[in-house]
Every structure is written in C-alpha cells, then in structure tokens.
Image: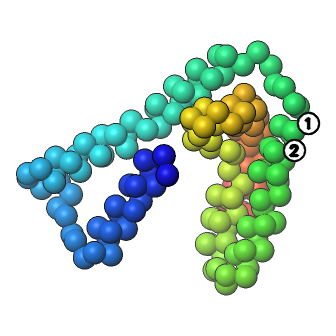
C-alpha cells in the first residue's frame, strides 16, 4: 500500500470505468495535469537508467553466483515454455503467442532494483540479477527471435 503506482492504477480504473472522458491536452487544470503526467512518464526510463548506473557503480562483484544464475535462468529460459503453455491454454492466435513468449523472456526489469532498495530486500542480489539477466538476454533473445521467425 506504500507504492504510488497502485493508487495510479486505481485512479485510472475509476476514470476508465466511471465513464469520464477527460480531454488529454485540453485547456484548464485537467489538461495541465495530464501534460505534467506525460512529462513524468517521459522521464521515467532515463531516471531508471541513472539509478541502475548508480547501483552498478557500487557493485564490487557478484555475490551468490549460483542464486543469480538460477534467477537469471528462470527468468530467461523457463519463462518461455510457461508462456507457451499459458498462450495455448488461453487460445491466443499465432502473433499474440509470439508476442507473449518474447515479452515473457525479457530480462528482469530495472524497476525491481527500485523496489529492492525501497523495501530493503537484498538490493545487491536484485541488482546482480537485473544486470546479469540484461547481459545474458542479448544471447537468449537473439536465439528466441530467430526461433519465432522475427529475424
């Protein structure tokens, strides 16, 4: 309950299902609010990359190499058959299945580093997994893209 994105999602659901159709770039306070939200959204990725860089600067080496390798393997390799099974059970078409498999096999997001720091849940380990999975995904995603016929 301490995470602002939860409140943003709840507010968006209320606006969406409440029938309100705000003018996204209109005049007035609401238009200014949406422009401010858009600016913050545009700045998110660069800020996350800066935070990841700061965390990488503090890492002296990867601790718990076996656990990092396990977490990376689960994220990049095991997620593919799970995504295939879920896509098949949901009856997704071919394009949607390929997209689901590719999205499921993406590396661990930088956001996890933010959460680990915020809640003080093994931030060094999480940062190691984020970094390792990002580097390893250059190989795994290339192979997967060839496999699904994108390349």
Q: Is residue 90 visible in the rendered structure shown here?
A: yes
Left or right for 115, reference 129: left
Q: Where residue 32 sits in the image (x, y, percent)?
A: 16, 46
Left or right for 49, reference 32: right
Q: Where residue 45 sits in the image (x, y, percent)?
A: 47, 37
Q: Where residue 71 sits in the image (x, y, percent)?
A: 81, 45
Between 30 and 120, the one lying in front of the other is 120
| Vertical position of residue 99 compared to residue 77: above or below | below
Q: Secondary structure at mark 1?
A: helix
Question: Where on the picture, by quarter, is residue 67?
Answer: top right
Between 135 and 144, the one lying in front of the other is 135
Q: Which residue is denoted by mark 2 in the rendering?
A: 70
- Tell me the crowding category of disc 1: few under 14, some 14 to 19, or many 20 or more residues within 10 angstroms, Cα based: few
Q: Where residue 47 sits in the image (x, y, percent)?
A: 46, 31
Question: Where on the picture, by quarter, is residue 60?
Answer: top right
Q: Residue at x 37, y 68 (%)?
A: 13
Q: Residue at x 29, y 67 (%)?
A: 15
Between 2 and 77, the one lying in front of the other is 2
Q: Which residue is denoted by mark 1 in the rendering?
A: 66
Q: Residue at x 48, y 47 (%)?
A: 3
| Vertical position of residue 47 compared to residue 143: above or below | above
Circles 1 and 2: CB distance less than 8 Å? yes
| Vertical position of residue 93 compared to residue 142: above or below | below
Question: Where on the picture, by quarter, is residue 124?
Answer: top right
Q: Is residue 113 visible in the rendered structure shown here?
A: no
- Which residue is situated farthest in the front direction here? 1
């Amino acid at each position: 309950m301490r995470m602002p994105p939860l409140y943003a999602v709840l507010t968006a659901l209320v606006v969406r299902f409440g029938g309100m159709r705000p003018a996204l770039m209109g005049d007035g306070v609401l238009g200014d609010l949406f422009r401010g939200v858009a600016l913050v959204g545009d700045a998110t990725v660069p800020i996350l990359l800066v935070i990841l860089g700061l965390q990488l600067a503090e890492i002296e080496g990867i601790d718990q190499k076996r656990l990092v390798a396990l977490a990376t393997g689960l994220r990049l390799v095991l997620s593919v058959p799970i995504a295939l099974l879920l896509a098949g059970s949901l009856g997704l078409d071919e394009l949607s299945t390929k997209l689901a498999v590719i999205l499921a096999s993406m590396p661990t997001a930088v956001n996890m580093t933010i959460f680990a720091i915020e809640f003080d849940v093994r931030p060094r380990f999480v940062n190691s997994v984020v970094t390792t999975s990002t580097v390893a995904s250059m190989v795994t995603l290339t192979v997967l893209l060839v496999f699904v016929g994108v390349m």
